[in-house]
Image (tube, grey):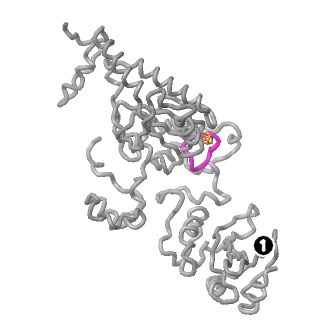
């Protein structure tokens, strides 16, 4: 068992739930209310120093009674130690967690992915949009257990909705690394990117007939 | 020699009279000779636009490299810009997110253009009968040649390319419908919805999966 668990219990008391070792990994459950404080402490306290967020993901179990879990895999490069922090989301409560982007910048896309696949909302995330599926995707959250493998809509409807997306409409100037090209871009594109407009955007000339 | 309009010729479109002249020409000695020349040139200098999305693209690279060498068939110039390509070669699975992309690439290619669908995934969705995958790129762009296999061996792809050559040699400029292109708006389906549903019916293992709505 990773000695960090004992330090955590000393510092936070009952906020820290059960802990066990699985395949050599120490897993510790943390209460949702104190999650961000605990994770910040794990990163910043000089004795712990988990400065690297390896992965952030979520699990839904087949057993419908079991809560969803959000998983934070931490690593201290400095000490060579690993810790897996888990947080449980009860099914009858809204799926909401505090974002850890203020602590680890790396959590940005990881949280977007979890939001995209599980529908868990991260409070105070700077830019919570779908990451893998396109932004106007309407069928729900694919990795949830109640999601049918082939999706909810008919294939034809899926093709139609996919084709209705504008492949250029998903990026901001920064994401395209085109900020310095701003003056060279066509006027309408520049305007659209500056507005930060997302998702479905009418093609130029869509109104006239083919 | 006088050019006689064939009985089934399409009347000239308003404002564009010149476009249908070729369509009014019946297949005669001149056009067949011309066809032969044009098709010979086209089929022997195709410029492919590789749209490699997955593992099949690796096999495509092998086809393009020295051992199999598609330059033997006049295809050594891989155009990574659709505006200078004749053959869209979709090698790999196509997720729904890329569907508008491949359509736009297809639309950007100048006529004459052809499409080869390489591999099981591009042709039918393959093993990926899931929420994220287009079940055959022919639901998004028209396809000329399907190459089966997962992945097809380079010989298979070469055979597909040769079949395409054969198809091109059989084309005639007297056929006005051949190069006619529909302009799609965003979200337009190119084949009827009913047909897409039928084409993407589950098969194999996936017939046991259910759809909730
Ligand atoms: S057909 Fe097979 S090799 Fe080709 S993209 Fe699909 S899985 Fe990969």
Assess whether residue A166 is covered by the magenta stretch. no
In the rendered view, does B52 fall on the left or right side of A21? left
Can residue A154 be spotted in the picture? Answer: no
Q: Quadrant of the N terminus of chain B?
A: top left
In the rendered view, does B90 fall on the left or right side of A150? left
> At 57% from the left edge and 66% from the top edge, which residue is drawn?
A115
Chain on which label 1 sits: A
Foreground pick, B213 / B181: B181
The magenta region covers B125-135
Foreground pick, B129 / B66: B66
Q: Overall secondary structure of the magenta stretch?
A: loop
Rendered position, B73 above or below A187: above
Q: Estimate the x, y position of residue B91 in percent, counting from the top left.
A: 53, 40
- Choose top left, top right, bottom left or bottom right for residue A181: bottom left
Residue underneath mark 1: A25
> At 47% from the left edge and 49% from the top edge, which residue is drawn?
A162
> At 75% from the left edge and 84% from the top edge, which residue is drawn?
A4
Q: Estimate the x, y position of residue B74 in percent, counting from the top left.
A: 44, 28
Q: Quadrant of ligand 1?
A: top right
Can residue A201 be spotted in the picture? Answer: yes
Rendered position, B94 above or below A146: above
Q: Secondary structure at mark 1?
A: strand
Foreground pick, A8 / A202: A8
Q: Estimate the x, y position of residue A76 in percent, counting from the top left.
A: 68, 79
Rendered position, B151 above or below B98: above
Assess whether residue B133 is covered by the magenta stretch. yes
> At 47% from the left edge and 26% from the top edge, which residue is drawn?
B73
């Amino acid at each position: 068992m990773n000695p960090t668990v004992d330090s955590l219990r000393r510092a936070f008391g009952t906020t820290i739930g059960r802990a066990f070792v699985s395949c050599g990994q120490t897993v510790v459950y943390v209460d949702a209310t104190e999650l961000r404080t605990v994770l910040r402490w794990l990163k910043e306290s000089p004795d712990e120093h988990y400065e690297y967020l390896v992965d952030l993901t979520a699990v839904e179990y087949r057993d419908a009674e079991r809560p969803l879990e959000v998983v934070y895999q931490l690593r201290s490069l400095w000490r060579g130690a690993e810790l897996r922090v888990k947080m449980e989301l009860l099914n009858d409560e809204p799926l909401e967690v505090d974002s850890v982007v203020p602590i680890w910048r790396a959590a940005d896309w990881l949280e977007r992915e979890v939001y995209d696949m599980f529908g868990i909302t991260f409070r105070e995330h700077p830019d919570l949009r779908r990451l893998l599926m396109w932004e106007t995707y309407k069928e729900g959250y694919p990795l949830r257990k109640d999601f049918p493998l082939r999706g909810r809509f008919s294939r034809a409807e899926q093709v139609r909705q996919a084709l209705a997306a504008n492949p250029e409409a998903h990026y901001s100037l920064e994401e395209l690394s085109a900020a310095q090209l701003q003056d060279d871009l066509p006027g309408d594109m520049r305007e659209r990117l500056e507005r930060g407009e997302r998702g479905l955007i009418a093609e130029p000339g869509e109104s006239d007939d083919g | 020699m006088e050019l006689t309009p064939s009985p089934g010729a399409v009347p000239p479109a308003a404002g564009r009279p010149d476009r249908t002249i070729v369509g009014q020409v019946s297949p005669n000695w001149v056009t067949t000779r011309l066809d032969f020349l044009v098709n010979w040139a086209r089929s022997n200098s195709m410029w492919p636009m590789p749209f490699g999305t997955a593992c099949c693209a690796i096999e495509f690279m092998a086809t393009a490299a020295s051992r199999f060498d598609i330059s033997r068939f006049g295809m050594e110039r891989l155009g990574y810009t659709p505006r200078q390509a004749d053959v869209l070669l979709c090698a790999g699975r196509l997720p729904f997110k890329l569907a508008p992309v491949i359509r736009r690439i297809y639309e950007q290619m100048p006529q004459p253009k052809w499409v080869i669908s390489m591999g099981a995934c591009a042709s039918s969705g393959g093993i990926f009968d899931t929420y994220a995958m287009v079940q055959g790129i022919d639901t998004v762009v028209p396809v000329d040649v399907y190459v089966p296999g997962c992945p097809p061996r380079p010989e298979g792809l070469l055979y597909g390319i040769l079949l395409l050559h054969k198809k091109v040699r059989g084309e005639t400029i007297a056929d006005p419908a051949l190069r006619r292109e529909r302009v799609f708006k965003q979200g337009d389906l190119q084949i009827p919805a009913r047909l897409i549903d039928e084409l993407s019916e589950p098969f194999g293992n996936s017939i046991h999966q259910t759809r909730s709505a």
